[in-house]
Amino acid sequence: MRHVEEVMGTVVSIELADDLPPARLTGLVESTCAWLHEVDARFSTYSDDSEVCRFRRGEIALADCSDDFRHVLDRCADLWRDTGGYFDAHGGGEYDPSGYVKGWSVEVASQRLADAGSMRHYIGAGGDIRMRGSGPGGRPWRVGVRHPWEADSLAWVLSVTEGAVATSGTYERGAHVWNPLTGKPAEGLRSVTVVGPDLAVADAYATAALAMGESGLAWLAQRIDEGYESAAVTDDGRAFTSPGLPVVD
Amino acid sequence: MRRSTAAAVGTLTGAALILGVRLSVQPATVPVSAAAAGNTAEEPEIDEAGEKTAEPEATATKKPSGKKTTAPAEQDKQEEAGLKSGTFKGKAVQHTYGTVQVTIKISGGKITAADATFPKEGFSGTINPNAVKSLNSSALKKQSADVDAVSGATLTSGAYASSLQAALDKAA
């Protein structure tokens, strides 16, 4: 079963490949969407009554925030440290965890689906995808990585059964990626894709490497030992992949 | 610079280098260079130190053991009175974690400031550049293939409409 849901300022694509009764699949999709909308309501920086906005205005103390809210705040701090400040939820001046929340919420959604009996699915949110089990026909999921100059072409095709694929790029119009350490637009890398166990981490790593520019390549190489493979394209069109990237030939 | 002065600078370089290294590892415990940072720009820069530091550098690697690590700069201040005024830059020294360069300021025969610069830009310095070699480099390919999903830079709802993922979703 396939479903498309507009939420969190983007479009979420859900595919359940499980051999389950249609009514059950529909229920799983509905509960997934309900969770994503719940996250959106709590973490949106666009709605004044979200937990994030109330926290920003000082109307709610950290101790009174939800467990999820404090978890997200903690993880943003962890990732800020782990990326040498290149993943910065405070980079825009005010606390904005959006860059973490999307991946995290999809990660949680996938776990909830698994707990509810869906062992074969993917959830993609605005180009960041979490997969579980095998895809249609029992083969691994096939994930295309968008070509950084040609929107209708792919640069790589990856084969994934368990894990996440996240891509950050400077090519999407209106989506400026900033180097939080210099305050200037990121340059040097056009596109960074990270593949690994956790979508929120993969997403943060891709964002951080992109912000670093070419030195992000060396940084990505060091993430391999943590279980995060990568593919990157420089502004001048050179392509780099880590040896363990699950590329389909 | 006289030879003795060069040697003194070298000793200082060594001492400051140790501080610099300590600093870069544990930013909280840095006394000298943090306080001194920012002062050097006001002084005329004498860029002769670069060529003279070959031997001081060797001194730097040998000296550390005998020094009191708590206040080596202090000690040197007293020992080396009578130095030529100016700002002296040590040779940039390559370490596994990046490049370190020490600058001292001498005024009135005393060292008035010592500072060490270390890589601040990205991870370019903190990582061995050879790390990139563990990535495979290749020409960017362009392909179209049957896929279940497409990963790309974050799409807004508007941009989604014209994306490959949208085409996939429609086709399903």
Image (spheres, rainbow, N blue to C red):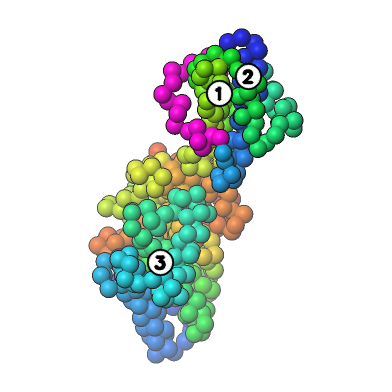
Asked whether the residues under the numbered discs 2 and 1 touch, taking CB atoms below 8 Å apart as contact, a structural biologist would say: yes
The quarter of the rendered structure image containing the C terminus of chain B is bottom left
Residue under mark 1: which chain is it in?
A: B
Q: How far is disc 3 from disc 2 in space, using C-alphas?
A: 58 Å
Residue under mark 2: which chain is it in?
A: B
Q: Is residue A62 left or right of residue A171?
A: right
Residue occupied by mark 2: B80
Question: Does the magenta-highlighted stretch encompass residue B33?
Answer: yes
Q: Nearer the viewer, residue B166 or B20?
A: B20
Q: Position of residue B116 (x, y in %)?
A: 54, 32
Q: How far is disc 2 from disc 1 in space, using C-alphas?
A: 8 Å
Q: Position of residue A215 (x, y in %)?
A: 49, 41
- Which residue sits at x=48%, y=45%? A216
Q: Is residue A195 left or right of residue B59?
A: left
Q: Which mark is residue B111?
A: 1
Q: Nearer the viewer, residue A55 or A213?
A: A55
Asked whether the residues under the numbered discs 3 and 2 touch, taking CB atoms below 8 Å apart as contact, a structural biologist would say: no
Q: How far is disc 3 from disc 1 in space, using C-alphas?
A: 51 Å
Magenta-highlighted residues: B32-52
Task: Give the residue type at disc 2.
Answer: Glu
A217 to A93, vertically: above or below = above
Task: Give the residue type at disc 3.
Answer: Val
Asked whether the residues under the numbered discs 3 and 1 touch, taking CB atoms below 8 Å apart as contact, a structural biologist would say: no
